[in-house]
Amino acid sequence: MTTEPSLEQFGYQQELRRSLSFTDLLVYGLIFMVPIAPFGIFGGVFQASGGMVALAYAIGMVAMAFTALSYAQMARAFPMAGSVYTYAGRGIAVPVGFLAGWVILLDYVLVPALLYLVASAAMASFVPFIPVWGWLVAFVALNTIVNYAGIQMTARVTKIMLVGELIVLAIFIVIGLAAIARGRAQAGALSPLFDPSTFSWPLVFGAVSIAVLSFLGFDGISMLAEESRETARRLGASMVAALVLAGVLFIAQTWVAALLTPGRSRLLAEGDPKGSAFYDMAAFAGGPWLGVLTAVATAIAWGFANSLVAQAATSRLLFAMARDRQLPHFLARVDAKHRVPVNATLMVAAISLVVGLYLTTREDGIPLISSLVNFGAMSAFLALHVSVVVHYVVRGGSRDWWRHLIAPVIGFAILVYVVINASIAAQTLGLLWLGIGLVLLAVSYASGHRPTLAGLTDAPEPSGAPDHHGGAR
């Protein structure tokens, strides 16, 4: 029989409020991924996949499923905030944890700015007398206020937003299927999954590197480990459940959309520079009102619901790294009344505002920040899979070959192929960011300030080591 390790065993005090249920965690993960996320990037994935959008999302779901399984295992061993930063630092070595945390900062710190930018541009197209920067400031301010009010307020708001997104998605699918039944399909029924005229593995995996942007967020559940009242096993199960549910929704909606997309040859040749391909398709399927509905829903989902939970998750990452003094310690301050990492929350808001306002001045703002977000997430997930093998098999002697060796190795291999087939810009900018992290780590060692974790230097955490059956002692 095994017992779950407590936070105090790892040298930390319980400062954040434990109030989140399994349902809260599941809703949080779904909102972070955004059930209607493909609306906003449909055109780009359509072109990159040669029209096989559903296939790109199906492969993306499988790839992320292996990653979710690895998250679930590490959450059982180390039930605390910090995500990959914590898991790699305690599962492999402290310096590796710093680098993993540094790389995933590309995802967590920049993704709110990306969400605000996309949503603000969409809203400005409907309410032009308010400029893009005005919408961006409004979204940042609103989300910061809600997150400061506490994690329970965030959980309540996300449930309401999730219901709204699912209603819009249901309306689109019903009307889309009705249009297909009336003979309005522009391609064969299986073409979104396989089109022999365009198929190639490098092409599809290049599209997967874009499509996985929609899946980023299930991992954010792990950031709430210290605010969950569930067991670590249930927390891990909520990540897997959120990923599978979102994946099914992504595949269903992109299948319908790909069949109804007008001007397929033009979209394949020219892409979707304005990001309006999905809304044009919706208008074709159900009329202009459906195009407007899907566009407005995307703006609200990205700019409020998704960025709200993204800001919450990012603040917990900064809090965890600052608590270990791997970032400025003032970011570890917890508000006495609301029990949230207040300075980290305000820092995320400030970064999102500055980066978002800067990107409004660039024509390539969205592609630029998207490439950084994806590279950061994929690279950090690679470190996660290695952490599972090292912690459980190498150090713990686990004989649970599927969960602790085979699944992580498969997940690692898929992600390597995705990263290799990503854009050159993503690889270049991501490696540059990693290089900066290596320099900072070298400077830290040279100055005698080696990175540490509570109760841990460069050695594995004894109390979190697994027994031979895979459980935490």
Image (cartoon, rainbow, N blue to C red):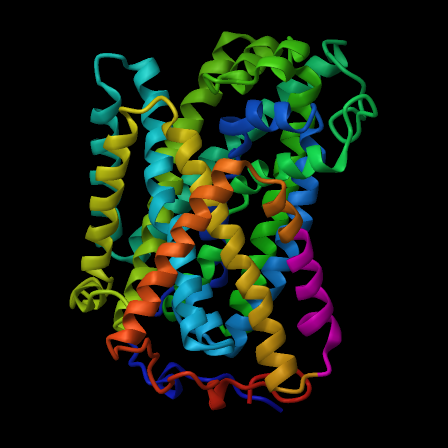
Q: Which residues are magenta?
A: 399-414
Q: Is residue 24 above or below residue 6?
A: above
Q: Is residue 120 rendered to the left or right of residue 49?
A: left
Which image quadrant for residue 117?
A: top left
Q: Is residue 407 above or below residue 94?
A: above
In this view, which residue lies farthest toward the right?
Answer: 196
Which image quadrant for residue 444?
A: bottom left
Indicate yes or no whether the magenta region holds residue 406: yes
Q: Nearer the viewer, residue 4 or 104?
A: 104
Q: Is residue 340 rendered to the left or right of residue 41?
A: left
Q: Position of residue 269 (x, y in %)?
A: 63, 14
Q: Position of residue 75 (x, y in %)?
A: 51, 71
Q: Nearer the viewer, residue 329 or 258?
A: 329
Q: Is residue 128 above or below residue 465?
A: above
Picture quarter with the C terminus: bottom right
Q: Which residue is pictured at 30% across the width and 18% down the height?
A: 124
Q: Which residue is pictured at 38% across the width and 67% down the height?
A: 98
Q: Position of residue 39 (x, y in %)?
A: 52, 27
Residue 193 visible in the snapshot: yes
Is most of the magenta stretch helix, strand or loop? helix
